[in-house]
Amino acid sequence: MTDTTLQLGHAVAIPASPEEAVLDRVPNPHPQARYVARFTCPEFTSLCPVTGQPDFAHLVIDYVPADWLVESKSLKLYLTSFRNHGAFHEGCTLDVGLKLVELLAPHWLRIGGYWYPRGGMPIDVFWQTGAPLDGVWLPDQGVPSYRGRG
């Protein structure tokens, strides 16, 4: 965790694992305002820890920042670092959410992990730090439920 952008504007290799990835944060220019920032990662990839087969998800991260914002290049590199990381859907989704809470100490955060089917069954994982804040516009995450060919 850093308070400056060590990666922005520099060539940076993709981290080999989430543990090696560095998330940068920058000061929120409007810490007094309550607003939602959203990051969408429609091509998140990790590995099944049992079979080693790739798993794919559509992640949606919404947060109400306090003093800090996550720097987007570092977030992209962090999320990409999961592509060779073996973990279950629940673990990956919660690891991302918990890491961001640790880094940013936001007023509120939620993450939706919409995982593509494996073995014929999609597994969706949702987590948030608490009840949504009053007076904050919180749009739907916009990812439809899995319907298969139906």
Image (cartoon, rainbow, N blue to C red):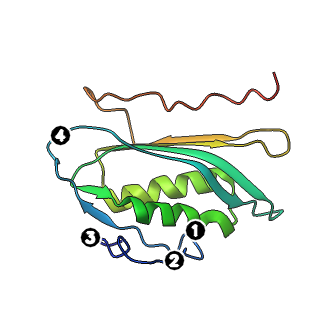
Compare marks 3 and 4 and give the one earlier in the sequence. Answer: 3
Q: Which tag, 1 or 3, sits closer to the chain's start?
A: 3
Query: Residue extending furthest top?
Result: 150
What amino acid is labelled 4 in the image?
A: Ala
Asked if residue 104 is positioned above or below residue 107 in the image, the reply reads below
Contact (CB < 8 A) between labels 3 and 2? Answer: no
Which numbered disc, 4 or 1, marks the residue that appears first in the sequence? 4
SS for dot 4:
loop
Give the residue drawn at x 31%, y 64%.
25
Question: Which type of secondary structure does the marked residue at label 1 adopt?
Answer: helix
> Which residue in the structure is indicated by mark 1?
81
The residue where tag 2 is placed is 20
Cα distance, mark 3 to mark 2? 17 Å
Residue 67 found in image quarter = bottom left
Location of residue 2 by image quarter: bottom left
What amino acid type should be assigned to the residue bearing mark 3?
Asp
Q: Earlier in the sequence, mark 3 or mark 2?
A: 3
Say left or right for 123 vs 111: right
Q: Do the residues labelled 4 and 1 touch (CB within 8 Å)?
A: no
Classify the position of the C terminus by image quarter.
top right
**Amino acid at pointer 1:** Ser
Q: Position of residue 137 (x, y in %)?
A: 32, 27
Which dot marks residue 3?
Answer: 3
Residue 78, position as x, y percentages in the image:
50, 65
Q: Position of residue 68 (x, y in %)?
A: 25, 57
- Residue designated by label 4: 33
User: Do the numbered discs 1 and 2 sit on residues whose CB atoms are within 8 Å?
Assistant: yes
The quarter of the rendered structure image containing the N terminus is bottom left
Q: Residues within 10 Å of mark 1 (few under 14, many from 20)?
A: many
**Label of residue 40 in the image:** none
